[in-house]
Amino acid sequence: MLDADPDNSGAAMQKAALLENSPRFSPAPTPFASLAIHGAVLLLWLALLIQAFLGHGIKGWSVGIVYIFYDTGLLAFTFWQTWPLRHASRPTHQGGALPRITVIIAAFNEAGVLEETIAALTRQSSPAEAIFLADDGSTDATANLLETRYGLGVESGGISAASPAVPGLRWLRLAHAGKAAALNQALAHVRTELFLTVDADTKLAPDAILEMQSAFAARPGLVAATGVLTPVCAPDFAGRCFQWFQTYEYVRNFLSRYAWGRMDALLLISGAFAGFRLEAVNEVGGFDPDCLVEDYELIHRLRRYGYVHDRDWHSAALGAARATTAAPGSARAFLRQRRRWFGGFLQTQFWYREMVGNPQYRRLGTWMLPVKAADTLQPVYGICAFILLLIYILAYIFTGRMAVLIPVGGFIIGKIILDLAFHAWSIKLYRNWTGGNTSIGFGPALLAAIIEPFSFQLLRHLGACWGWLRFLTGSRSWR
């Protein structure tokens, strides 16, 4: 049966589990290691900023040197951990029954893309048992589409019968309360071992669900997994430029997730296409409706709970589970997206600060989260380095002084060469990991590596700095 719980006991249990297991409600004392790591990142930035005014020669650009060394260190880590992918091939699936799975699509005013997303789900080699369209109070043509195209009908607050056009498709019609709340209400109706969250503008490859099911079947301790996403933007000039840059950004980021997964320290699971074990998610209280990045926060809570309660819980990035997803194709849309992402990242880092540097959480606490502590100020370092570079260029234009510009230029050129080499190598690794089904070319990737530090990367840092403002002001919104 898929009827709603009339006394809301499921929702009450979910909220109680969230209150019990989220450290934002009952924060543990912040250990000295966490204070020291976060404090060191801040104090180093202040010291380097002072050095910019007091230092002579290349010392005046110390903030840029530290920024380059930090980013290069992350590249070296990813290179080392992804080394096995140089001979990787598509996984082979063992025989036997696969775990049943439900897809949840949380949507708000997404009528223009829903039909393609649902069509991709109907073409799966291993179809989902049910598809719940969690309509978060849409005011566009969503209702008309669901009624006329799929034969669905339901009053506000209810769930429809299955569609006569698409087996298993149901409409959960909700009042507008945000993506996390929509996902939580849909969870109450899931009757399968696994569930997927799929954004309304995300189209799964034909074997995507099969790959998810196979991974969870092979690893009983796997509680969350992310598929690999390829960004798609509008076909105009601006959209093509943003798609170009974001494509290579996604390649690097997903390889990084694979690297952290090998360390059993993966925290970033993309809710646009993610698989979860239902029992584990319910046990920790579902999605947090007050977090800007509900998927990212949930993984922290799952992993924290697993260590505290001695559960063998893991997370993973699955190269063979692929999908395309809509990405921002203009500067304004991109900045708004990165503002929300980074603001939510800061929220989560603050709530889970007691895990940073804490050996109780093994490599997650002693490796991944200290890196995330450094990432809180990475965009600030990057913006400061760029501003100082502009000052040195202006000084050369008006005074002809090259004392600082020459060594600074040497560092920048060296960094570009390293990025070029990593970009070329990462394309090979990415093709092996995802099964070779990609149109990514080496030439455009290398060109992106040269241009990115002075264009797209700055825009990304600006969006993150805007995220700092959102975090400090306490603003929250799905959009």
Image (cartoon, grey):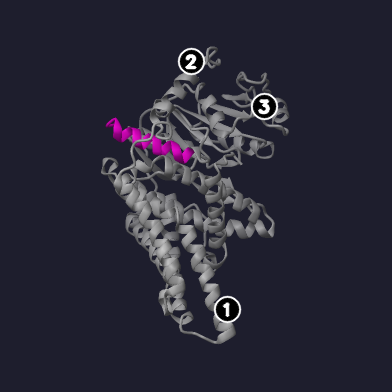
- Label 3 to label 2, Cα distance in Å? 31 Å
Residue on which the image places disc 3: 150
Number of numbered callouts drawn: 3
Relative placement, left or right, of 97 versus 106 is left
- Marks 1,2: beta carbons within 8 A: no
Q: Nearer the viewer, residue 425 or 224?
A: 224
Q: Secondary structure at mark 1?
A: helix
Instruction: State whether residue 289 is above or below residue 251.
Output: above
The residue drawn where x is 42% and y is 62% is 45
Q: Nearer the viewer, mark 3 or mark 2?
A: 2
Instruction: State whether residue 40 is above or below residue 310.
Output: below
Q: Give the mark, 3 or 2, whose residue is nearer the N terminus.
A: 2
Q: Position of residue 38 (x, y in %)?
A: 37, 52
> Mark 3: few, some, or many residues within 10 Å (few <14, many ≥20)?
some
Asked which quadrant contains residue 242, the reply is bottom right
Indicate yes or no whether the magenta region holds residue 297.
yes
- Can the viewer see residue 425 in this picture? no
Q: Position of residue 200 (x, y in %)?
A: 60, 37
Residue on which the image places disc 2: 9
Q: Residue furthest top?
A: 6
Indicate yes or no whether the magenta region holds residue 323.
no
The residue drawn where x is 49% and y is 63% is 382
- Marks 3,1: beta carbons within 8 A: no
Q: Position of residue 156 (x, y in %)?
A: 66, 21
Q: Secondary structure at mark 3?
A: loop
- Marks 3,2: beta carbons within 8 A: no
> Mark 1: few, some, or many residues within 10 Å (few <14, many ≥20)?
few
The amino acid beneath tag 1 is Leu
- Label 1 to label 2, Cα distance in Å? 66 Å
